[in-house]
Image (cartoon, helix red, strand yellow):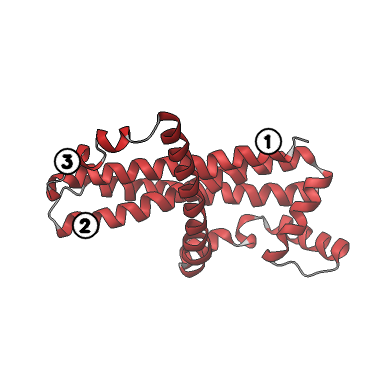
Amino acid sequence: MEPLGIKTTIYDFFSYFIPGVVCNVCIILSIYFSSYTFSIPLKDIFTEEILNLMPNWFLIITLILITYVFGIIISNISSLFIEKWLMKNISFLNKYFCLDNILSENTNMLFHIKIKKELNITFSKSDMRLIITNIENKKVNSYNTAFVFLTIYGTNRNLCCIFLLIGIISLITNLIYHCNILFPIVLIILSIVLLYGYIRFYRYYISHLVSAYLS
């Protein structure tokens, strides 16, 4: 089994750092495309005088830390907004996260029978941690594959949240000030694509965990 630190580093990079970078870029691009409306050139916001006040190494470390913190904040927001609220309150999306919809009827029946027999519980979604721990300890290769799906669906969810929120804010702002709305529309379309990726790999993740537990 790979050391926990390696797994954590991989997850941090894809689920926190990359979304943090994308968030910073999207904010800068949103400012750039709206700067014509507000008559504030982008170069006046990030002036050479300000950047020259900081040593290169300090600037790099600061940007990395800001990016990582942004990624963590985004992850928490996306978990709350997309996973906890959006998926539970929009019925046509919620059905894709139900175990009955992810698994076949036979697999679902076998899974509940085994859970009841081994753990003496009636399975609910909150009990999935027990399954994950079981697979992590007994079936390392299966857990490693599931970890890949976890990382991909987490990254998709975080990027979806970034594009959706910045896209909506930029769209409203640009409509109010009669600015070009092409960029926010592109962001919103990309958020829909990433939402599909999130749902897809979440289902892969759950399906793989159950299959590994039953095998």
Q: Residue 122 appears at what percent x and percent y?
A: 77, 70
Residue at the spot x=78%, y=50% of the render?
213
Q: Residue 70 appears at what percent x and percent y?
A: 45, 49
Give the position of the N terminus as an image quadrant: top right
Mark 3 or mark 2, which is nearer the start of the sequence? 3
Residue at the spot x=51%, y=67% of the render?
88
What is the CA distance from the residue labelled 3 to the residue labelled 1? Answer: 42 Å
Disc 2 + disc 1, Cβ < 8 Å: no
Secondary element at image label 1 = helix
Nearer to the camera, 4 or 114: 4
Secondary element at image label 3 = loop
Residue behind mark 3: 41
Looking at the rendering, which quadrant does residue 121 occupy? bottom right
Disc 2 + disc 3, Cβ < 8 Å: no
What is the CA distance from the residue labelled 2 to the residue labelled 1? Answer: 42 Å
Residue behind mark 2: 173
In the drawing, what numbered circle is on residue 6? 1
- Specify few, some or many for label 1: CA neighbours under 10 Å numbering under 14, 14-19, or 20 or more: few
Mark 1 or mark 2, which is nearer the start of the sequence? 1
Q: Is residue 164 left or right of residue 142?
A: left
